[in-house]
Amino acid sequence: MVNQEYPVELTAPDIEPYRKGNTGVEFVTTFDSGIPGPHVMINAVTHGNEICGAIALDYFFKAGIAPTRGKLTFGFINHMAYHTFDADAAGESRFVDEDFNRVWLEERLDGDEDTVELNRARELRPIFDTVDMMLDIHSMGTYSKALMICHGNEKERAFARKANYPSYTMCGSGHIVGRRLIEYTPFGDPATDKVALLVECGQHWAAEAGTIAIDTALNFMRAAEVISDEFFNQHVSENGKNPPVAEEWNVVGGITADSDDFTFAEQYIGMEVIKKAGTVIAYDGGKEIVTPHDECLLMMPNYNPGAGMRKLRLCKRP
Ligand SMILES: [Zn+2]
């Protein structure tokens, strides 16, 4: 199956050289500065079809990155799914058995279920438990503008403001089933200082997604104060260099399709702001779906069909 709607403009890098790593966990490498400081981790391919993160990590490895303090860890998270990536069927490598980004519940991690993703999560968990600041790199189904996602705790908002890239920060769970890595207890707990953010770098295979992933990681690592200004300036793009102050939004609701016959009122790509409450934005089995409040931002419309599919997140200004 050729994906005609969204051409694959990026090339998935060969990550085999990073298999061995140096942590005892495959595809995880830690650079230790030997100087006290935070443990920062950047994750790629949490979803196997979202290749921009692999491009960013491969780029930093080749650029000879070295933290100026603390530790910096790079992980190719769902390398099992990534290895099935095929540009001619680019959408089909998101996961092997289940979504890696929904398993982060203690009862599942500690349980005895056996899935490829749960086993990988169990392998990575001891590393994640030592991380102070984590950036999880993703991409989206449409040509939406890039956005940062946080669970919504003040510590996350504060760090996202410091990183200030890309130009939207979206706070709130968006009513997912299961639990995302950024909400895994040490990160989601307001009582710890640990912070995890998730970036959506634009359309999965659009050329600019690779650059956005690199720029986001650079701004994140600079905010964590683990890279030099020299390294930052040498590798950041013009867009990533002096970005405007990012807009902050709260994710206040989600729309899940009740029927197989769900259509959007317009061909939304995401981040449209609908002025008036009561505006029809979709039809679900003949039923009209309207915006619940004024100034409603439509985040990450999902064009995958089927009842039970989460179709959209709805956001409000804080
Ligand atoms: Zn993703």
Image (tube, rainbow, N blue to C red):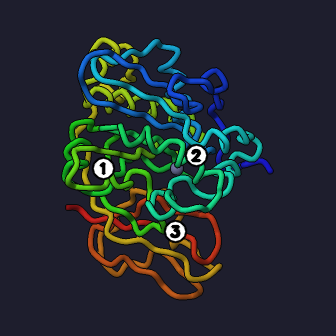
Amino acid type at mark 1: Thr
Amino acid of disc 3 = Lys
The quadrant of the image that shows the C terminus is bottom left
Whole-angstrom CA distance, mark 3 to mark 2, is 28 Å
Q: Locate residue 224, reporting x and y percent.
A: 26, 30
Where residue 132 appears, as percent x and y from the top left, is 30, 38
Q: Select label 2 or label 1 by which is in front.
A: 2
Query: In this figure, which residue is indicated by the disc labeled 1?
Result: 169
Does 255 appear above or below 46?
below
Count of numbered circles in the view: 3
Q: Quick one: which residue is furthest to the right in this view?
A: 1
Cβ(mark 2) to ligand 1 < 8 Å?
Answer: no
Residue type at tag 2: Arg
Residue drawn at point x = 30 percent, y = 49 percent: 169
Give the residue at mark 2: 120
Kind of element beneath mark 1? strand
- From mark 2 to mark 1, how far is it between C-alphas? 29 Å
The answer for how far apart the CA atoms under marks 1 and 3 are is 20 Å
State which quadrant residue 16 falls in: top right
* Residue found at x 26% / y 38%: 164
Point out the frontmost of discs 3 and 2.
2
Residue at left offset 41%, top offset 69%: 175
Disc 3 under 8 Å from ligand 1? The reply is no
Q: Position of residue 138 (x, y in %)?
A: 49, 44
Q: Which residue is mark 3?
A: 311
Tell whether label 1 touches label 2 (CB within 8 Å). no
Front residue of 77/272: it is: 77
Secondary structure beneath dot 2 equals helix
Crowding at dot 3, Cα within 10 Å, few <14 / some 14-19 / many 20+, comes out as: many
**Disc nearer the start of the sequence (1/3):** 1
- In terms of secondary structure, where does tag 3 sit? strand
